[in-house]
Image: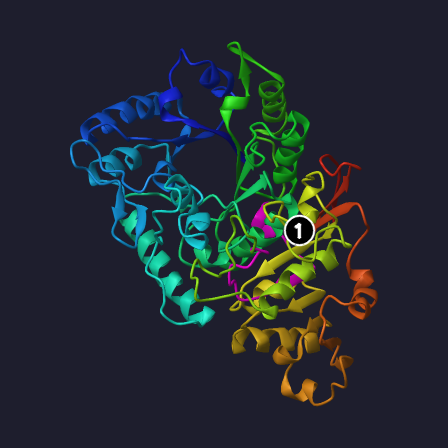
Amino acid sequence: MKIGVNTHFDRVRDDDAQYECVKDYVDFLVCHTDPQGTSLAEAVENTRKAVDTLEKAGIGYVANFEFQNFVHDVTAPDGTEWALNTDTLHRLVIPDEYIKMLTSGEHSEGIMYDEFEHAIINQNLSIILASKGKVKKSVFPLSESEDPVEQGELLSKQLADYAAEMKNRGAKRLMGEHVFPVLFHTFARNGITPNFKSQKESVSDIQFAIASGAALEYGIELWNCVDCWYRLTNPGHSADEMYNNLMFAYYAGVNNVYVESTGVFTQNGEPNEYGRKFREFSVKFRGARRKYDIHDFRPETGIIRYDDTYWGQGDPMLWRYMLFGNKKIKPTKKSKEYVKVFSLITHGETSKGSYSWNKISPYALRKHRSFMTMNSTAVFDDRVKKETLKSLKLCFLTGISISDETLGAVAELVRENGLTVVTPKRFAPQEILKNARGSYSEIRDGKGVWIVTDNIAGARVKKRIAPFLGNKGEIRLTFENNTVTMKISPDGNALSVEEKEI
């Protein structure tokens, strides 16, 4: 696993305390770039100095773009446009000269559109707030339909075109940085590397469960940003919590992990407790010979759904009650089933209304914790193939749509492998549905069983599937040849790890 930190290209110099604190302890840096107020030529030259320093040091670097998320007009003094900016649209544009300089080096790792999914599903909310509500623009053109699937497929094509353009212009990777646990699969399907945030306002292992399913399904790397912000506070998490989230990434098979940001690592020019904890982690785990990675993950519990971008949003202040950033498309009961399933499989530790502290609700008044009980779980989208699902013992079918091919694969695994499936009636095969009675039925099918119910997270389901849910207070992950069990501390922010070879 490669280890890094988030910083700024302007800080990559030998007289900078933050750079000095980490340069001998990292494989890569995620570097913010902010060319506002300079000409293109000046922006290229300023960043080139940092790129040359990193190339000489042999340190990888990702160019991170976030400034465009806060300012709707990012036209440079020389007229260079850093964002597409029309009456209705706003998204990042990188000039040819700049991207060529960023991507031509041996150690260039790619381009990161910071909080890309946030900008999409919340219609560039940071710009709305900065303009006091005067400027409201979408990232991509929206569908005129009220059909979430039609909107989702339009977005998929738009992302595919955007990612292809970045890669055709030299980017080794394109990735986002997901504040909200949505669009991982849509991104991955279209060539955008999954990159989940942990800590922040997230439940780290839920973020992992969703992003890991995307990485498995589409055979793509998995990155992890351990974010020290909590709401408007940085650092909003302790140094020990940061260390444990880094450790979780290692044992969960993540390919690349980094901390946001080096700003919390030093005080008066010297490493503070955060800097020392990061160094301690790096010394122990950087270059360690882990016996597996994310593509060896063999989850035992699966959730299959069409990613309609629902995570629990809907409050009077920030997170508008819409899907895909399209105000014409509202969440339904079908959307909300998914969140209830997470409450069920975490032994009730997450709310039935959301699994993020971003949701403004009584639950969000509880003290944040990074880790919740979970037993070897991954989330897949509506078109996942049979091969990816073979390790499952328990599977939930939920949401607004699942492809016929995927439903056929699940049915085969019930009959052949003994899979237990929990499903609403709309996803049950006809031959199963004709035997269903009332609000809850169990129907044997070959080696396995269908649980057909009107409440997939209800009390009867909970009692029936209890043997699949693992032990309360533990995160368990199963890999091809290894099982990892992590016991969670009472405050939910520390882990003790036991690893066994199978």
Q: Is residue 99 left or right of residue 388?
A: left
Residue drawn at 20 percent across, 31 percent down: 40
Q: How many marks?
A: 1
Residue drawn at 23 percent across, 24 percent down: 45
Residues 423 and 343: in front is: 343
Residues 42 and 148: in front is: 148
The kind of secondary structure element at disc 1 is loop
Q: Residue 277 placed where, x, y %? A: 63, 22
Residues 272 and 387: in front is: 272
Q: Is residue 441 above or below residue 300?
A: below
Q: Quadrant of residue 427?
A: bottom right
Q: Residue 109 placed where, x, y %? A: 39, 37
Q: Residue 328 placed where, x, y %? A: 43, 66
Q: Is residue 225 magenta?
A: no
Asked if one can make out residue 169 in the rendered structure from this viewpoint, the answer is: no
| Most frequent secondary structure within the magenta stretch | loop
Kind of residue at badge 1:
Phe
User: Mark 1 Cα within 10 Å, few/some/many (few <14, many 20+)?
Assistant: many
Q: Is residue 397 above or below residue 107?
A: below
Q: Is residue 142 left or right of residue 290?
A: left
Residues 103 and 355: in front is: 355
Q: Residue furthest left?
A: 78
Identify the magenta region. Answer: 293-313
Q: Is residue 190 above or below residue 40?
A: below
Quadrant in which the N terminus is drawn: top right
Name the residue tied to disc 1: 479
Asked if one can make out residue 484 in the rendered structure from this viewpoint, the answer is: yes
